Image (spheres, grey):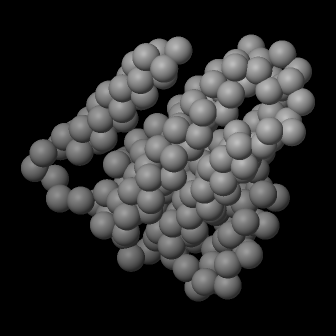
Amino acid sequence: MASETSYAAVGVGVILSVFVLAAASADPTAAPTAAPSSSKHSLEEVCKQTTGHQDLCVATLSADPSSKTADTAGLAQLAIQAAQRNASETVTYLSSIYDDDSLENKTAQLQQCLEDCGERYESAVEQLSDATSAVDTGAYSESEALVVANQAEVKLCQRGCQGVPDHRNVLTARNRDVDQLCSIALTITKLIRGPPS
């Protein structure tokens, strides 16, 4: 089982590397895309673009006072940071339930699910930190690739726990929250560059 986990982790690492390399090498002569000076959308305008997640977008971004004056790149960073905080809280939660001896029916299968998801979420926290830095330097395609890779980690976590009897939904709500926050971050990051020409 541990070797399967190692292979899965290596596979995700390779996929992430491909995303990042593809984003970085799309046009080797191009300088990082800087946010256009007109790239200022209000929080409400940005959140209207997040189909199906508008209320979550407004609630999440407006919770940070800096969202009132942030440009589109700043709003993208706030959305990524919200996803990162949520992922980090999930790492803590996973650690607490993994070590909880009182959890009923804590089978080897459930322990493996928790361990695998813990590793995936630790990776997700790092990816989201890198995604925030990428927005800061104008590497928007790289940021998008990192957020997409994070969503893949969350989906693999969810899939890995689906076969655990009595606990198949142990992380469903947390996985959904991180996935939705990442969708919001992706939408906003794409707005920075404006509509495709």
State the image coordinates of residue 56 (x, y, percent, origin top left): 78, 57
The vertical placement of 65 against 28, above or below, is: below
Q: Is residue 48 left or right of residue 120?
A: right
In the image, farthest residue toward the left = 29
| Quarter-of-image position of residue 84 | bottom right
Q: Residue at coordinates 28% horizontally, 60% vertically from top-left?
A: 33
Q: Residue at coordinates 42% horizontally, 45% vertically from top-left?
A: 146
Question: Which of these two is toward me, 122 or 178?
Answer: 122
Q: In this view, does 52 lie to the left or right of 88?
A: right
State the image coordinates of residue 97 (x, y, percent, origin top left): 75, 43
The vertical placement of 188 against 180, above or below, is: below
* Whether residue 71 is visible: yes
State the image coordinates of residue 172 (x, y, percent, origin top left): 78, 34
Question: Which of these two is toward me, 105 or 80?
Answer: 105
Question: Which of these two is toward me, 24 or 17?
Answer: 17
State the image coordinates of residue 180 (x, y, percent, origin top left): 69, 46
